[in-house]
Amino acid sequence: MTSFAVPPLTPTTLPIEGLDAVFPVRRVFCVGRNYGAHVRELGGDPKDQPPLFFTKPADAAVAPGGGVAYPPGTSDFHHEIELVVALKGGGADVAPTDALALVYGYAAGVDLTRRDLQNAAKKTGQPWDSAKAFDESAPVGAIRPASGDVPSGAIRLSVNGQVRQDGRLGDMIWSVAEIISEVSKLWRLEAGDLIFTGTPEGVGPLARGDRVEGEIENVGSVAFTVA
Ligand code: MN
């Protein structure tokens, strides 16, 4: 039997609606610039800038009831509500027509962002890791097993009861099937992977003590308080 010199990582897990089994997170992929109005609110033009990918570590995911602390190193900590796709299968070079068969289910998640560090990284051409891939940067709600239909309804986020983001999943530039296909051209996907699919407009700053509540129609909710 293998003897570990330090304790091996225990997988981060997410609850699944209606089941005792939990979903073990392998990797977290994220899409940026996938809603035109959000690209414009950050000063870009969706015609010149196609969606892009970045990642977060699996242990950045925070299950319901887990804590989200205001992170060090920022004074502009932003919320981005996103549809999260949870995969039950994978592969490389997946065709869009085969992609939805890989989906286990969907959840609501928040791509937490150090916007000041992201803006600095964009200016200097440096990596986004410190802006996006920090501890507790990916709170996710319970996973709802896929019913066959891709969710297409409302996606909303409120802070202390005030609506900040109020979009439609149908406004995504790349669809869920296209996203899975595009990610699989760059990384081999596996069961346990999560894909954050981008955020609609209305992103903005959070402060310590803020109560954040997100909801996606026919998918579920995500909620946390910034500690
Ligand atoms: Mn995002």
Image: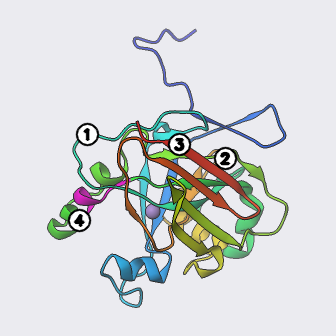
What kind of residue is marked 2?
Ala
Q: Which residues are magenta?
A: 113-118
Among the two numbered marks 2 and 3 on one chain, the one whose residue lies closer to the N terminus: 2
Q: Main secondary structure of the magenta part?
A: helix
Taking 159 as reference, is 193 left or right? right
According to the picture, the residue beneath numbered tag 3 turns out to be 224
Residue 72: which disc?
1
Residue 161 vertical placement versus 67 (above, below): below
- Nearer the viewer's eye, disc 4 or disc 3? 3
Among the two numbered marks 1 and 4 on one chain, the one whose residue lies closer to the N terminus: 1
Residue 13 in picture, x, y percent from top left: 62, 34
- In this orientation, which residue lies closer to the viewer: 183 or 214? 214
For image coordinates 71% across by 48% down, the residue present is 143
Q: Is mark 1 within 8 Å of ligand 1?
A: no
- Nearer the viewer's eye, disc 2 or disc 1? 1
Taking 107 as reference, is 197 left or right? left
